[in-house]
């Protein structure tokens, strides 16, 4: 008697979770993975916070640092967190301006997940004495969904 195939919950397609996975050399080489949302049809917010995000200035090659907050309301898919961590750390040797890094993260997630709603708050630490923060969202979130504040304090210098 043949055993029936397990239902395709998307996890059979995961190649990084539970594996020793090399750090991608660039965001373009990173593989973001997704799994089916566990509560389809319900609107809830998923938050990922990367308080030690790092990339490189494309002109000087000096490191840039940011506190990144990603909020999204899933539709059919959620992002697999290990693949997201690898994707975010792949920016460590990637030279791009703050705006480009922030939008590349957001748009890559939107393309992969096709969420109901997504926003990114990228709170960059000062370069040349001034912080550059980047905010973007896909549109208005659905009514009735609790969207928590990102609560990342703005840069205040030494005062």
Image (cartoon, grey):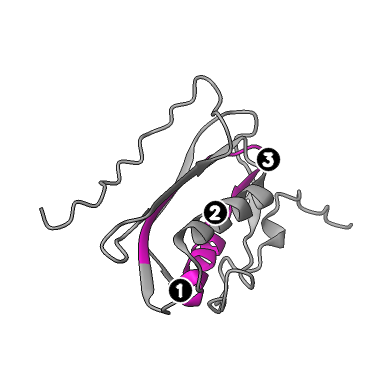
Residue 92 - label: 1
* Relative height, residue 58 to residue 122 (above, below): below
Question: Which of the two labelled residues, at mark 3 and mark 2, occupies the earlier sequence position?
Answer: 3
- The answer to which of marks 3 and 1 sits earlier in the sequence is 3
Q: Which percent across, then down, holds residue 15?
A: 66, 68
Residue drawn at point x = 68 percent, y = 50 percent = 111
Residue 139 horizontal/vertical position (percent): 57, 33
Task: Give the extent of the magenta segment.
Answer: 65-94
Report the residue marked by disc 2: 103
Residue sitting at the far right: 1
Q: Secondary structure at mark 3?
A: loop
Residue 81 magenta-highlighted: yes
- Distance in Å between CA atoms under marks 3 and 2: 22 Å
The residue lying toward the viewer, choosing from 148 and 126, is: 126
Q: Nearer the viewer, mark 3 or mark 1?
A: 1
Which residue bears the numbered disc 3?
A: 76
Q: Is residue 140 magenta?
A: no
Residue 121 in view in this figure: no
Residue at the far top: name it. 144
Q: In the shown orientation, is residue 45 left or right of residue 108?
A: left
Residue at 62% x, 55% y is 108
Mark with earlier residue (1, 2): 1
In the image, 58 versus 142, the foreground residue is 58
Question: Residue 3 placed where, x, y %?
Answer: 83, 56
Say which mark, if any, is on residue 130: none
Q: Which residue appears at 71% of the width and 61% of the height? A: 13
Residue 131, image x, y percentages: 31, 56
């Amino acid at each position: 008697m043949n055993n029936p195939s397990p239902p395709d919950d998307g996890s059979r397609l995961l190649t990084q979770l539970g594996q020793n996975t090399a750090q991608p050399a660039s965001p373009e080489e990173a593989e973001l993975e997704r799994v089916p949302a566990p509560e389809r049809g319900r609107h809830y917010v998923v938050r990922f916070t990367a308080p030690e995000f790092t990339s490189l200035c494309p002109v000087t090659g000096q490191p840039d640092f940011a506190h990144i907050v990603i909020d999204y309301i899933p539709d059919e898919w959620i992002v697999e967190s290990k693949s997201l961590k690898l994707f975010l750390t792949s920016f460590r040797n990637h030279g791009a301006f703050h705006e480009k890094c922030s939008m590349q993260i957001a748009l890559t997630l939107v393309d992969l997940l096709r969420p109901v709603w997504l926003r990114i708050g990228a709170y960059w630490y000062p370069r040349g004495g001034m912080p550059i923060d980047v905010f973007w969202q896909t549109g208005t979130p659905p009514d009735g969904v609790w969207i928590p504040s990102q609560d990342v304090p703005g840069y205040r210098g030494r005062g």
